[in-house]
Image (cartoon, rainbow, N blue to C red):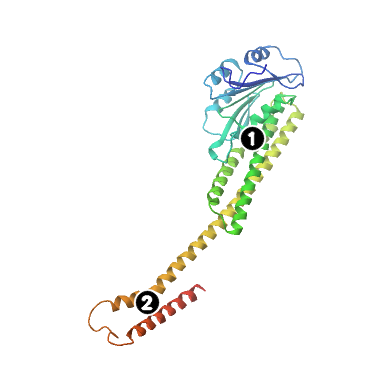
Amino acid sequence: MHPSYGSDPDGLICGFLFAGGEPGVAIDLPRALDWLAGQPSVGTSDFVWLHFNLADAGAEPWIERNLAVAPEFFAALHEGSRSTRIEDARDTLVAVVNDVAFEFSFDPSQIETLCVNVGPRMAITARVHALRSIDRLRQAVRDGVCFRSSLLFLDRLLQDQADVLVRIVRQATLQVDEVEDKLLVGRLGDKREDLGKLRRVLVRLQRLLAPEPGALFRLLRQPPPWTDEVDLDALRQATEEFSLVLRDLAALQERIKLLQDEIAAQVGEHTNSSVFTLTVVTVLALPINLVAGLLGMNVGGIPLAQDPHGFHWVAAIVVGFTALAGWLAFRRRD
């Protein structure tokens, strides 16, 4: 019977045994320890996968006490750097995989980390928050997916991560298309903030994922002794898929940058137009303000004060100077 989610007191989320090329069989921690303590069959690639919830305080101490995990795995759990990488630690693969939270809404804070320890007979994954890639992998195992070796398990995890990123890029592309359409018709609204937020998410994804192809290439040049050439070919394919995803991320970032530049140019043009209009209004109002100020001083000697047509003369002078100022202003603009 498969253990229910989060019910194990040692933080185990799920465990599966892959033996004889058959689909994974659900297994709990005592049975997994008994299987790992047994002698491996010669020439087999059977392994057990244990997935832990690090939010459970007992998970990490239990792993350290009972499982032969590389020290680099625990170092990866606590170090500040979260760049994606895969290292060969004493013939054991230790990976730090960045992924998005299960309920991802294009928020940079929803990018989380999964730590992986892969050996010839055991694969350990641990995370704090629910992640899309590992959840897809767990569902695939429940649906009957088989893994010939633990390295192919890691390859499938990387492929699921690449698939999640492809979907993110597609969703981001749709949002960029929407902003571009609104830009063409002049109805941006609050889309400028969404565009900046989207670019920040993509920049952080690329920054965290960019080291991964280089780390994979180093691993492929010097693989652990328990790997075979067929499994390495599958890992090479995962490397190529990641390179394509990162290339798409870079292209989408450049497109967003061009849109932001275009929006900034339009905002600047609109601001200049508003400032020019305000300046013209100020210039046009200047003659009448000056004349009104001079004629309203209530002192002797005001011209045209006794002239029956004085108002018309003053109005004509004001209109004339206003028309001249407007002509000069619009001429400068042209």
Q: Amino acid at mark 2?
A: Pro
Rendering coords of residue 146 (x, y %): 74, 25
Location of the N terminus (image quadrant): top right
Q: Amino acid at mark 1?
A: Ala
Hey, which residue is sitting farthest left in the picture?
300
Residue 222 shows in this picture? no
Q: Going from the N terminus, do you reach mark 1 or mark 2 first?
A: 1
Relative to 103, 224 lies left or right: right
Residue displayed at 51% across by 32% down: 80
- Disc 1, SS: helix
Q: Is residue 182 above or below residue 144?
A: below
Mark sitting on residue 57: none
Quarter of the rendering containing residue 290: bottom left
Relative to 228, 109 lies left or right: left
Q: Is residue 5 above or below residue 155?
A: above
Q: Which residue is mark 2?
A: 287
Relative to 230, 110 lies left or right: left
* In the foreground, 236 or 191: 191
Rendering coords of residue 106 (x, y %): 57, 41
Hey, which residue is sitting farthest front in the picture?
308
* In the foreground, 178 or 159: 178
**Label 2 neighbourhood size at 10 Å, few (<14), some (14-19), many (20+)?**
some
- Disc 2, SS: helix
Q: Is residue 263 above or below residue 118?
A: below
Relative to 283, 224 lies left or right: right
Q: CA distance from mark 1 to mark 2?
A: 73 Å
Residue 296 shows in this picture? yes
Q: Which residue is mark 1?
A: 215
* In the foreground, 31 or 105: 105
* In the foreground, 226 or 17: 17
